[in-house]
Amino acid sequence: MQVDELLKPFPIKEFHPFPRALLGPGSHELIGPEALKMGFKKVLVMTSGLRGTDIVHKIVESMKYHGLEVVVYDQVESNPKDYNVMDAVTLYQENKCDSFVSIGGGSSHDACKGARISVAHDGRNVNEFEGFNKSENPKNPPHIAVSTTAGTGSETSWAYVITDTTTDPENPHKYVAFDDASVTTLAIDDPVLYYDCPIDYTAQCGFDVLAHASEPYVSRLNFEPSLGNALHAIKLTGQNLRAAVWNGQDLAGREGMMYAQYIAAQAFNSGGLGIIHSISHAVSAFYDTHHGLNNAIALPRVWAFNMPAAYKRFADIAEALGVDTYGKTDVQAADAALAAAVRLLRDVGIPEKFTDVTADSYSKNRLGQGPTKYYERAKTIKGDDADADRITNHVLGDACTPGNAKECTFDTVRPVVDHCLNGDLDDLLG
């Protein structure tokens, strides 16, 4: 089914399932018994390596203690690339593995979901499965996803995002694949594993949550079962993100963000996303910058763009963020929601426009670091007319764009993109 067909007026809307989940402090210690119960024998672990922590080592040793054989692929990159997926598939097949465990954030989980789909189709290239339910074999290897960040929600959603670097190496393309067959078998969210997240990374992941929650709340899909989760996730983010960022050992803040990211993903799982994500995907495709950082920069501009189509919904968002809206019109309350989002962005120290992002401006930066010759040349975000044009065109082809609250055309979206690249946030606040 094509994206536009999904949004045509129709009385039946689709609810997508969630996996079983274990949530809470210490839950990651149950991975060995859970894997055995699910029939795992030889496991491929997919991760970025989480260098600077001992998380991967401890989980791998725990699985080995319970009698599991473990093979580790620890080369998953931010904005996972097609070759990350295919390298893991080769390792899985060569070692005759029977199951997967992903450890990390969205990149590890997404790459693993793509690898499972590829394995189920005899190692076909993952790029063949871009789109909606493109896989033909509904059965693929079981998968436990262990999250180490509060942002992605990939451990509970039917989506995975991959950067295609091979179809056209000079024009990398980041796409979303939605596939019910990619849903993990078990999700494990343990806030104790978040303690090692750097300050800036925690902040960026938190804005990924705010994007995941706010976009389905104002989406044209208007999926009623998603609205409550979306609004509560916004409330949890407003209440907990500052504590999680600036006091990373604060269990209440970390656990609050754990629940926020988990239920925000359940909201967008069936409720859809919008051009916050589309812009983020485009900038990641061309500059390999972090998805959460991109969402944070795009979010205020997209909220301002969408508000005329959904003032009442944005007024609700203001209340969820703790704004006193008594006596305010919906328009005034929506403006207050935007101001609250900008205040939160500034409070957690996120760059305010894309041209402010440099090679040393955040800890997980990959700007200009490869992995291909294309990315080695992309050492600074240009922000010129050509950049705005190519980002806008990528946005218009993104699978998230049709769900956006306001209709999107090149002429309406390009000014939003240009403001993300070069604009001053104070201009939005009047």
Image: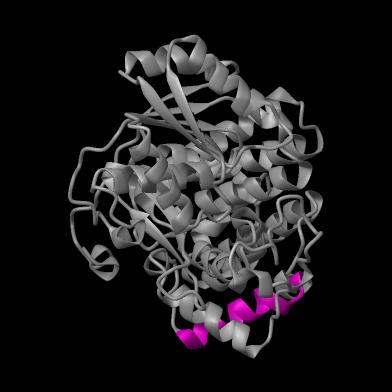
The answer to whether one can see residue 207 in this image is yes
Quadrant assignment, res 79? bottom right
Where residue 415 appears, as percent x and y from the top left, is 60, 83
Q: Left or right of 293: which side holds 397?
A: left
Quadrant assignment, res 211? bottom right
Q: Is residue 424 magenta?
A: yes
The residue nearer to you, when weighing 67 against 296, is 67
Q: Is residue 403 magenta?
A: no
The residue nearer to you, when weighing 43 against 176, is 43
The answer to whether one can see residue 228 in this image is no
Q: Residue at x 75, y 70 (%)?
A: 425
Q: Quadrant of the N terminus?
A: bottom left
Mainly helix, strand or loop, the magenta region? helix
The residue nearer to you, when weighing 322 against 169, is 169
Q: Which residues are magenta?
A: 410-425
Where residue 227 appears, as percent x and y from the top left, is 42, 46
Q: Residue at x 78, y 69 (%)?
A: 356
Where residue 276 appears, as percent x and y from the top left, is 54, 64
Q: Is residue 352 above or below residue 114?
A: below
Q: How many marks?
A: 0
Q: Residue at x 47, y 41 (%)?
A: 109
Q: Residue at x 43, y 66 (%)?
A: 404
Q: Left or right of 140: which side holds 62?
A: right
